[in-house]
Image: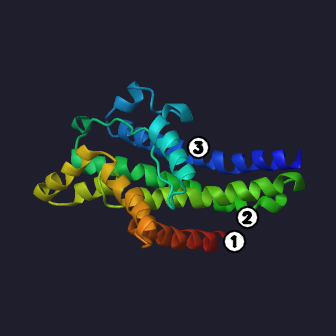
Amino acid sequence: MDSELSIVESVIAFGVPTLLAITLHEAAHAYAANMLGDTTAKDLGRMSLNPIRHIDPIGTIALPLLLKLSGSPFLFGWAKPVPVDDRRFKNPRRDMMWVALAGPLMNLFLAMVSARLFVMVDSFPPEYQKIAIDTFKNGLIINILLMVLNMLPIPPLDGGKVLLGILPTGLAMRLAQLEKYGMLPLLLLMVGLPLLGNTIGVNLNPIGWVVLNIADEVVQLIARLSGL
């Protein structure tokens, strides 16, 4: 019974913050687009806090599960992208940047909330403190990892869309060509290279190294600011 309860607690402690991180990240994109004049996501029901509306069967479930079962050194996945029609914006390049930033900023906010709740765990009933500690710790780490990953300046990630809004038009148009390949370049960099490295006995995980190191620094900073 204790082992079964432990498994349930572990699923809750990891699953709840993960679903919140993914759902609110995508919902933030939808709300930002709606505020800036594009109602596409709203019309399609994506301005929702229901995780099911944002889950991609392949990117959110099948791929991470397959990577976990195959022993991949890096788990990777994605949610269903929020549809955005930049023709409805007053300033398409600027407004697309704000829409792109909304998701990572939401994850930063959730990470800070998780850290503050972690500090308050001592005031929780003793029987709930362990699962609360695990949940809030995971909430801090998962949200920062998602924020840092999405801010990589590679289309179609949010950071890539921000970069497209900053670069000169000609250069931005050339970089935007990467978007037609979807997640394939990222899959090759984040999954293909590490798996190849494992096969030949070489560490080939540059994206993972960058994301994990930056995320670790950000987590430590938030922890210090929160009094952890």
**149 left or right, relative to 69:** left
Q: What separation in Å lies between label 2 and label 3 (alpha carbons)? A: 22 Å
The residue tagged with tag 1: helix, strand or loop?
loop
Q: Earlier in the sequence, mark 2 or mark 3?
A: 3
- Per the image, the residue denoted by label 2 is 119
Which residue is located at x 44 percent, y 49 percent?
103
Label 3 belongs to which residue? 19
Q: Amino acid at mark 3?
A: Leu
Which numbered disc flags the more N-terminal residue, 1 or 3?
Answer: 3
Q: Nearer the viewer, mark 1 or mark 3?
A: 3
Report the Cα–Cα distance between label 2 and label 1.
6 Å
Residue, disc 1: 228
Please state the horizontal and vertical placement of residue 12, each as a whole percent of the image: 71, 46
Q: Amino acid at mark 1?
A: Leu
Residue 54 vs residue 135: left or right? left
Asked if 86 appears above or below 216 in the picture, the reply is above
Q: Which residue sits furthest front? A: 200
Asked whether the residues under the numbered discs 2 and 3 touch, taking CB atoms below 8 Å apart as contact, a structural biologist would say: no
Residue 151 visible to the viewer? no
Circle 2 packing at 10 Å, graded few (<14), some (14-19), many (20+), is some
How many other residues sit within 10 Å of disc 3, few (<14), some (14-19) or many (≥20)?
some
Pinpoint residue 105: horizontal percent, then vertical percent: 46, 55
